[in-house]
Image (cartoon, grey):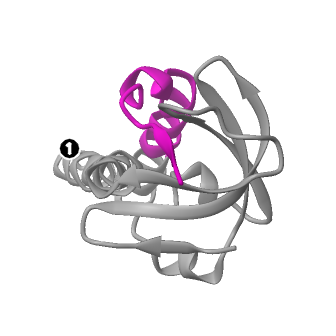
């Protein structure tokens, strides 16, 4: 089992573990190629070890134990990367710069900036579901 990235899609190979309606739960074993993927931080399939993702399918229902390919778009991965890495980096720089400009001192400014990023990640954890509604996987045979 492994993961691949082509021009349009991020592909993961996995095994169907459950089927509910028009969605299948697929167990994906993390591949070493996930380490190089730019979306690995937010991709549910890229977490360490085996991971189960929910993927929609069309047409014939996949069978339990069937090997399938799960795909997500590169655009989805880039969007996840933006929210996971770029936005908090910009937040860190802006808050740090503002605090230094307000003569808060370097140490205190650094603590405030790190605290702002920590709050950002907590909020992202709790409200990220609304941001990532469009992030989905599809079963492909």
- Looking at the image, is 141 positioned above or below residue 95? below
Question: Which residue is the site of mark 1?
Answer: 102
What are the residue bounds of the magenta stretch? 115-141
Q: Can I make out residue 58 in this image?
A: yes
Q: Position of residue 118 (x, y in %)?
A: 53, 42
Give coordinates of residue 127: x percent, y percent: 48, 21
Decide which of 34, 23 is in the foreground and name it: 23
- In this rendering, position of residue 100 left or right of residue 116: left
Quadrant location of residue 130?
top left
Residue 123 lies within the magenta run = yes
Q: Residue furthest front?
A: 60
Picture residue at 75% right of the left edge, 52% below the top? 66
Residue 108 in sight from this viewpoint: no
Query: Could you tell me which residue is drawn at 37 percent across and 57 percent down?
Result: 85
Mark 1 secondary-structure assignment: loop
What is the chief secondary structure element of the magenta stretch?
Answer: helix
Q: Is residue 47 magenta?
A: no
- Horizontally, residue 118 falls left or right of residue 9, namely right
| Foreground of the two, 138 or 86 | 138
> Eyeballing the image, is 87 above or below 58?
below
* Nearer-the-camera pick, 29 or 100: 29
User: In the visual, does 54 lie left or right of 115?
Assistant: right
Residue under the image location 16 percent in, 50 percent down = 101
How many numbered marks does the figure carry? 1
* Pointer 1 local density, CA inside 10 Å: few below 14, some 14–19, many at least 20: few
Q: Is residue 122 above or below residue 94?
A: above
User: Considering only vertical position in the picture, is 132 above or below 4?
Assistant: above
Quadrant where the image shows the N terminus:
bottom right
Residue 136, given in percent of the width and then of the height, sits at 45, 37
Give residue 65's position: percent from left, percent from top: 83, 50
């Amino acid at each position: 089992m492994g993961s691949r990235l082509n021009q349009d899609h991020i592909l993961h190979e996995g095994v169907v573990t459950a089927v509910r309606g028009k969605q299948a739960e697929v167990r994906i074993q993390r591949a070493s190629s996930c380490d190089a993927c730019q979306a690995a931080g937010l991709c549910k399939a890229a977490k360490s070890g085996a991971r189960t993702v929910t993927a929609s399918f069309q047409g014939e229902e996949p069978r339990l134990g069937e090997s399938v390919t799960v795909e997500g778009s590169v655009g989805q991965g880039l969007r996840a990367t933006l929210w996971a890495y770029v936005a908090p980096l910009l937040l860190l720089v802006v808050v740090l710069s503002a605090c230094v400009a307000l003569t808060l001192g370097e140490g205190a400014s650094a603590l405030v900036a790190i605290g702002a990023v920590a709050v950002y990640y907590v909020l992202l954890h709790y409200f990220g579901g609304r941001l990532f509604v469009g992030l989905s996987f599809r079963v492909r045979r």
